[in-house]
Structures are given as C-alpha cells and as structure tokens.
Amino acid sequence: MSPSIWLTTLASFCEEVAAANPAPAAVAVSAVAANLGLGLLIKVLEITAKRKNFSGDSLKVRALIDAARHESEQLRAVADEDIAAVRQYLRSRNPSAVQNAIEVPMRAARAAVSGLDLCSEAAGIIHGLVAADLGAGVLLLSAAVRAILLSVDFNLRQLRSEEGYSERVVAERRMLEDRAAYQADAVLSQISRD
C-alpha cells in the first residue's frame, strides 16, 4: 500500500492528482476538500468559543468540535482507502473490488453529510465575519458530496448482477444527496440573514 496522502506535501498531492495515474482521483480529492471544509467548521467554532462575549453553551460547542474532528478522521482514512480501492479494482475488476470501490466512496459521502449536519447545528452559534468561513466550509462539503456520489454512480454501472445491492446503494445515495443539498441551503440561508 502507498504511504498516506496525509504524509505528503500539498504540492506533491496536487502533482499526483494531475498525473496520468488512475489514483488519487475524484473521491480522494473530494474527501480532502470535505476535510478542509470540516477544518473551517472547527476553526469558526474554536474562535467563537474563545470570544470574551460568548454566552452560548460551551459544552455544545466542544461536542460539535469533537464530532467534526471525528468526521475529519473518517474522511482522512477514506481518502487513503479510496486510492487503494481504485488500484485494487483496476488490478482485478472482480465484483468484490467493484463493491469496495462503491462502499469506500459511500463512507466518504456519509462523513461529509454528517459534517453538513454539524454545520447546520453550528449555524445558530456562529456570527460575524467567521460566518463566511462557515459558509465556505458548507460549500466545500456540499460539493464534495456531489462529486463523491458521481463516482458512486459510475462505479455502480460496473455491477451487473447485484440488483438488490445496487438498489440499496441508489436509495441511500439519493438520500445523502438530498440531505446534503437541504443542509447546505439551510445553513447558507441562515448565515446570510444574520
């Protein structure tokens, strides 16, 4: 297995993405973008909690930060797992490799959608200039979900005989896409009103 992308520089990761290699590709890149979106969420929560005039629930803020860090860890792991899954699929092209090339992105999409749920919870707490950072985080997470699910759609086309499995994945991916769009719109509307 290749070393983790998280141990390289951003410049070398970008070069690897732009190279003629099959991986890292869309899902790994999207997981990195979603991870950056969660980083912005954590940043604005940390800044908000440290303000002298903060009168909100500091335990809730800490719980949101901890949950965002957990989803961030999930995305970091999935970025590396996706690179391995793509390489495994290209080597074998067997049904279990195809399923893995679907399951790994689905985990990434779930983590990114959970990140959007956290942004929604945080939206009522975040005020002032840092709300723009929250909005940027939401946009990164939302775009990442859509890009990841696009990869799922293409990978599903490779499954021929797994109808029950495909139907379950299609139903969940629709739910994730809808929830991501709803949460993103809700947060962006709320922060633009404040």
Image (cartoon, grey):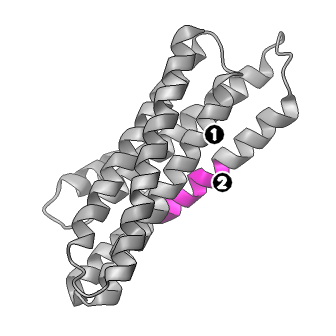
Q: Dot 2: within a 10 Å radius of its alpha carbon, few (fewer than 14), some, or many (20 or more) residues?
A: some
Q: Are marks 2 and 1 in contact (CB under 8 Å)?
A: no
Mark 1: which secondary structure?
Answer: helix
In the picture, the quarter occupied by the N terminus is: bottom left
Label 2 or label 1, whichever lies nearer to me, is 1
Image position of 92 with respect to 147: above or below? below
Residue that appears at 86% across and 27% down: 57
Q: CA distance from mark 2 to mark 1?
A: 11 Å
Q: What is the span of residues highlighted in magenta in the rendered image?
A: 69-79
Amino acid on which the number 1 mark rests in the picture: Leu
Residue that appears at 36% across and 72% down: 167
Question: Is residue 25 visible to us here?
Answer: no
Residue 49: quadrant of the picture: top right
Q: Nearer the viewer, residue 125 or 50?
A: 125
Residue that appears at 39% across and 79% down: 165
Mark 2: which secondary structure?
Answer: helix
Number of labels in the image equals: 2
Image position of 101 with respect to 16: above or below? below
Residue 104: quadrant of the picture: bottom left
**x%, y% of residue 115?**
57, 44
Residue designated by label 1: 118
**x%, y% of residue 146?**
34, 47
Amino acid on which the number 2 mark rests in the picture: His
Residue that appears at 45% across and 62% down: 172
Mark closer to the chain start, 2 or 1: 2
**x%, y% of residue 94?**
26, 90
**x%, y% of residue 26?**
28, 55
Q: Is residue 35 left or right of residue 70?
A: left
Residue 125: quadrant of the picture: top right
